[in-house]
Amino acid sequence: MKKRINRYLLLTVFLTLAATLFMAGAVFHHIYREQVVDDMQTYARVINGMVSSAEELEALYTNTQSDLRVTAVNTDGAVVYDSKAGDMPMDNHADRPEIVEAEQNGEGYSIRHSDTLRRDMYYYAIRLESGDILRVSKEADSIWSVFRGTMYGIAGIGVLMLVICMLLSRYITRSIVGPIEKMAQDIDSIEQIDAYEELVPFIQTIQQQHLDIIKSAKMRQEFTANVSHELKTPLTSISGYAELIETGIAGENEVQRFAREIHRNAQRLLTLINDIIRLSELDGGHAEVSYGEVDLYDIAQTCVEMLQLNAEKHSIRIACHGTRCIIYANKEMIEELLFNLCDNAIRYNRINGRVDVTVGMQDDRVMLSVKDTGIGIPEDSQERVFERFYRVDKSRSKLTGGTGLGLAIVKHIVAQHEAELKLHSEVGKGTEMIVLFKKYKK
């Protein structure tokens, strides 16, 4: 990464220097050319004010020393006078661009490059009163010749700038990458890194993700330990009872009791495995879930009817109240949520207790309430009851066959439906679980 940043910075500097040199050359060339043309124009106009024909020009300009070359051309294009040519014969100038332009517009100029002399030739022509053309010309170094003369100076400045930029590039790269390297070396002390302002949100995000990973790993470790423990208990019982029957130690009267215990523990084991699989599916979130219009009251009534026999077996009265309310949800998940809440309400209730399931509206939201008259949940345990395998009364849970995963599944389903879960409980008086769903709007 350091090499890449250095490379990009140096490339940027090189391109910037090249672009600056090119632009400076273009501007300098334009100014230089304009200056030469302006000087020649001024000189030509001064001469124009003094003479009116080619003959007067020749009489005036003869033996005058000047760097400028003065030429007089008659209306046919023939050269009448040239200050530098002397007696040498000269070509007809009628087709020269500056002559043509002067004849048409009164003034004209052109610039031509001489490959032989490697110099630019500047020409400025003006029409005299007689119709003859006065042309002033001057040799000047081309822009490339000027640059060649200053090449060593420009190269020296360029090298100096590149060295300075290399040092600055290394400093900037170190400033950018330094905090990231420190963060990689000691991610646990990430908050102590002296980072620049733009990196702070990134550091905070990495820190939060790191904490979440640690928390998730810890939860996974605890979950694995709890699963192992929960599976071990019924398997030990099954193995023990089966061994007693196999060795013949159990009498005829005890065989039936042992078989019943084996069956009960096997059912508990199956329930536990099913809950673990279900919780794993909800955690993964990869399964396709279909949503649609769901009548919450209809599902609640069906669940109450299904659990009626189980409630009577525990001497519990269960009833459904409320009105028809439509929510946008997954029907199977809502059925599972209701079953777990009602099953818990029956499981942790008292003899001759009640379970009331209510569906209705509360502040423009659909409310599901499952209220029991059971043992209640202590205040210090109310936040933990949704943790996996957490039980308020462990002995009662094992006696009734609870897995400790029901409310964890409920919490997942509530979160997936973007609903709100509330818990109201008082020890010895009972518990009420309230789920608030968004009202369905077509």
Image (cartoon, rainbow, N blue to C red):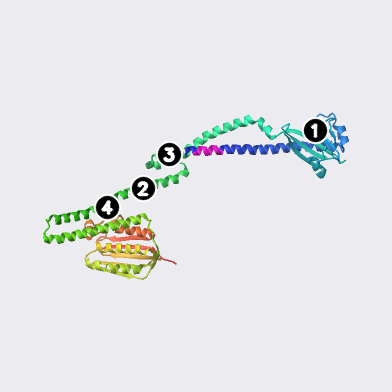
Vertical order, 92 against 297 (above or below): above
> In terms of secondary structure, where does tag 2 sit?
helix
Look at discs 3 and 4 and give the one toward the viewer: 4
Task: Decide if residue 158 is on the left or right side of residue 235.
Answer: right
Local crowd at mark 4 within 10 Å, few (<14), some, or many (≥20)? some
Q: Are marks 1 and 2 in contact (CB under 8 Å)?
A: no
Query: In the rendered image, which residue does mark 3 sit on?
Result: 181
Q: Which segment did they paint magenta?
A: 4-12
Task: Decide if residue 111 is on the left or right side of residue 214.
Answer: right
Local crowd at mark 2 within 10 Å, few (<14), some, or many (≥20)? few
Q: CA distance from mark 3 to mark 4?
A: 40 Å
Residue at the (85%, 34%) spot, across then down: 81
Can you tell which mark lies on residue 69? 1
First in sequence, mark 1 or 4: give its number: 1
First in sequence, mark 1 or 2: give its number: 1
Can you tell which mark lies on residue 213? 2
Identity, as a three-letter code, of the amino acid under mark 2 = Ile
